[in-house]
Image (spheres, grey):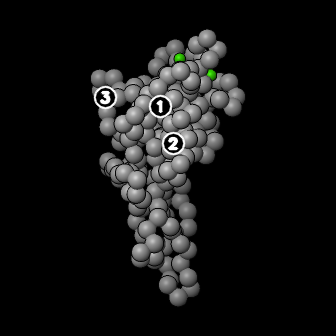
Amino acid sequence: MYNAFTGLCTPGSYLKTGTFGAALAPTTTEGDLFAPAACDTNDGFTFVTSGTLSACIKVSSVPMTYSNAHAHCLSLGAHLYVSRSIERFYLLPGSLVYIIGLTDLAKEGIFVWEDNGYVITESLKSSLFEPGEPNNSNSNEDCVIVVFWGLGIFAKDYACEGNEFQFVCERPLVL
Ligand SMILES: [Ca+2]
Ligand SMILES: [Ca+2]
């Protein structure tokens, strides 16, 4: 099954009727049935899609610090929004500033995605960040916001604590 979120193909999963939220492996008697990607909409999450892109998200109405936003998403079985492409950021409601799930908290200058710990690719890093960013200003900027600006978006690093922004929690799609 192709996963538009990870870009990877994985063995198909089977969603039993009435067990929304848990993808179960098919039994030998059930055969190779496949369910489309689904969003667990409990707790106010919604499914957003455009073209081949899709996500299961909840937009915060209350600005928080990174650590509080991170913990809040975690408590919902989610993580701060991550995207491997510029296009996928446009699934988010525009005209706002969001904390995303990308930090260099673990190692200065190495920005990793918080869903899987992978380092952002150099090509995405250079196209996503505003020129001159990330600049680790005052040696104290390890978190990242995306800013919708006109018809484009750009990212910048900022000081994690003492700054509150809106954010988006993202749940993995149930495959
Ligand atoms: Ca930094
Ligand atoms: Ca900065």
Pointer 1 residue: 64
The CA distance from mark 1 to mark 2 is 9 Å
Residue 153 appears in view: no
Q: Position of residue 143 (x, y in %)?
A: 56, 27
Q: Height in image: 30 above or below 65?
A: below
Would residue 5 appear left or right of 28 to someone viewing this image? left
Query: Which of marks 2 and 3 precedes in the sequence?
Result: 2
In front here: 9 or 133? 133
Would residue 173 appear left or right of 91 to someone viewing this image? right
Circle 1/circle 2 CB separation < 8 Å: yes
Query: Which of marks 1 and 3 precedes in the sequence?
Result: 1
Quadrant containing ligand 1 reads top right
At label 1, which amino acid type do we have?
Met
Would residue 28 appear left or right of 154 to someone viewing this image? right
Tell me if mark 3 has few (under 14), some (14-19) or many (20+) residues whose alpha carbon lies within 10 angstroms of its own: few
Pointer 2 residue: 72
Tell me if mark 2 has few (under 14), some (14-19) or many (20+) residues whose alpha carbon lies within 10 angstroms of its own: some
Would residue 118 appear left or right of 47 to someone viewing this image? right
The CA distance from mark 3 to mark 1 is 18 Å
Q: Height in image: 113 above or below 46?
A: above
Number of the label disc, if any, that sits on residue 95: 3
At label 2, which amino acid type do we have?
His
Q: How many marks?
A: 3
